[in-house]
Amino acid sequence: MVRKDMEDFGLTLREMQIIRLIADGASNRSIAETLGVTEGTVKNGINVLKPKITGVEAGGSFRLRLALWAHKVGPYQE
């Protein structure tokens, strides 16, 4: 399948980077180091994503649901 562009989801480049790193299994610390920001900035970025991402089913870990969404229907789709 063709990968969707981030504009299709109304996401910023930074949000897309966070999603991709989460989908790859990265921790907040690892994401922060990769992006050159603090862990607090990563946590805030994840919290901003919660209301933006539609189609992420309720319940359980948001990180897990976000990673599954990214691979299934989101911008990380292969």
Image (spheres, rainbow, N blue to C red):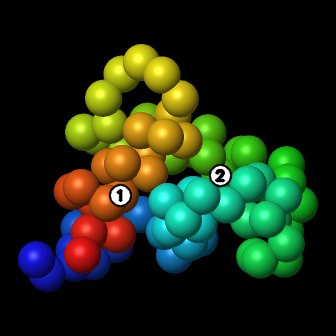
Mark pair 1, 2: CA separation? 16 Å
Q: Does residue 9 show up? A: no
Badge 1 is on which residue? Answer: 70
Q: Looking at numbered disc 1 in the image, what kind of residue is underneath it?
A: Ala
How would you rate the neighbour count of disc 2 (Cα within 10 Å): few for under 14, some for 14-19, many for 20 or more? some
Left or right, 21 with reference to 60: right
Q: Quadrant of residue 2?
A: bottom left
Q: Is residue 30 visible to the viewer in this orientation of the structure?
A: yes
- Who is closer to the viewer here, 43 or 34? 34
Given this view, does label 1 or label 2 mark the residue nearer the observer?
Answer: 1
* Placement of 11 over or under 5, stated as above or below: above
Q: Is residue 65 above or below residue 18?
A: above
* Above/below status of 57 relative to 27: above
Task: Say whether disc 1 or disc 2 marks the residue closer to the N-terminus.
Answer: 2
Tally the marks.
Answer: 2
Numbered label attached to residue 45: 2
Instruction: Give the amino acid at mark 2.
Output: Gly
Callout 2: SS: helix
Residue 8 on image: x %, y %: 23, 67
Kindly give the residue lying farthest to the right in the view shown. 38
- Quadrant where the C terminus is found in the figure: bottom left
Badge 1 vs badge 2, beta-carbon distance below 8 Å:
no
Task: Residue 62 in the image: state x and y as whole percent.
Answer: 51, 34
Q: Residue furthest front?
A: 25
| Front residue of this view, candidates 11 and 32 | 32
Q: Secondary structure at mark 1?
A: helix
Check the picture and name the quadrant holding the N terminus: bottom left
